[in-house]
Structures are given as structure tokens and as C-alpha cells.
Image: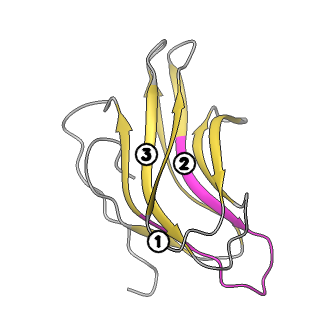
């Protein structure tokens, strides 16, 4: 996952919890906004997709989504009370083995960026 400005392409397919995530050090009292361009399969139900910030134990800010036929931008913001390690993530849960559920992430951005020297990371599907 690239948390600076840039393009990320990724897709994850399996039963259970699936997520792209990266651990970062976030500064206290700075508002961070995680934005991703994504779409999902028709098999993803409302509330099964999730984008957000995690403190290692629980989500501290997140937004859920369901089926997204077309690429859409989703954003969530978080202002830490103190500087610390947090995970940013974009994921979904496939609750049944009977549906083909997947999420495709095209671009990810964290504003403000942590540094301007981030390199793009390309995720590939397992079948590529």
C-alpha cells in the first residue's frame, strides 16, 4: 500500500477477512485522511467492506461499504491524540463460501503524506 501520493493497484480474493494494510507512525493532533479508489464484486453485501485506521487492538476510525459496481472514492479521517503506530487498511469480509466476493483497489492516498519520497507499490492478483 502506498500512503503517499501515487497509484496502487490491488485485488484480494478469499473466504474470511481480506485486507491491504500498512503500519505507520502518525503524529499527534494532525488530521489524516485515507482515501481509496475501489470497486467490489456483486457478492459483497452492505457493511462487509471497511476502510480505516486501526490502533493494533481496534478500529479507531472507519467507514463501511457494500457492493460498488463502479470505481468510487472512499475516505475516512482520523486525528490521533498522541503520536503512535497505527495501521491503515482497506478490506472486506466474505461471510459465505457460496459467493464470489472480492475488492479491487486502484489508488490509495494518505493526506497529509508522511513524506514525499514514497514509492508506488503495485499489488498483483494471485493469478497474474
Badge 1 element: loop
Q: Residue tagged by mark 2?
A: 89
In the image, is 13 to the left or to the right of 46?
left
Where is residue 51 shown, x and y percent of the image?
58, 48
Q: Earlier in the sequence, mark 1 or mark 3?
A: 3
Q: Quadrant of residue 61?
A: top right
For marks 2 and 1, give the one nearer the viewer.
Answer: 1
Could you classify mark 3 by the number of other residues whose Cα lies within 10 Å: few (under 14), some (14-19), or many (20 or more)?
many
Where is residue 42 shown, x and y percent of the image?
63, 79
Judging depth in this view, the residue of 125 and 112 nearest the camera is 112
Q: Residue tagged by mark 3?
A: 35
112 relative to 16, above or below: above
> Does 47 lie within the magenta span?
no
Distance between the Cα atoms at labels 1 and 3? 16 Å
> Does 103 lie within the magenta span?
yes
Residue span colored magenta: 88-105
Distance between the Cα atoms at labels 2 and 1? 20 Å
Q: Residue tagged by mark 1?
A: 70
In the image, is 60 to the left or to the right of 78?
right
Disc 2 to disc 1: CB gap under 8 Å: no
Amino acid at each position: 500500500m502506498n500512503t503517499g501520493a501515487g497509484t496502487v493497484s490491488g485485488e484480494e480474493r478469499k473466504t474470511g477477512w481480506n485486507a491491504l494494510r500498512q503500519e505507520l507512525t502518525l503524529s499527534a493532533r494532525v488530521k489524516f485522511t485515507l482515501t481509496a479508489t475501489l470497486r467490489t464484486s456483486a457478492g459483497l453485501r452492505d457493511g462487509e467492506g471497511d476502510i480505516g485506521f486501526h490502533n493494533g487492538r481496534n478500529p479507531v476510525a472507519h467507514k463501511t461499504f457494500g457492493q460498488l459496481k463502479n470505481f468510487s472514492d472512499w475516505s475516512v479521517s482520523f486525528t490521533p491524540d498522541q503520536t503512535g503506530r497505527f495501521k491503515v487498511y482497506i478490506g472486506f469480509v466474505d461471510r459465505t463460501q457460496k459467493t464470489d466476493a472480492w475488492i479491487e483497489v486502484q489508488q490509495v492516498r494518505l493526506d497529509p503524506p508522511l513524506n514525499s519520497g514514497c514509492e508506488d507499490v503495485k499489488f498483483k492478483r494471485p493469478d497474474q
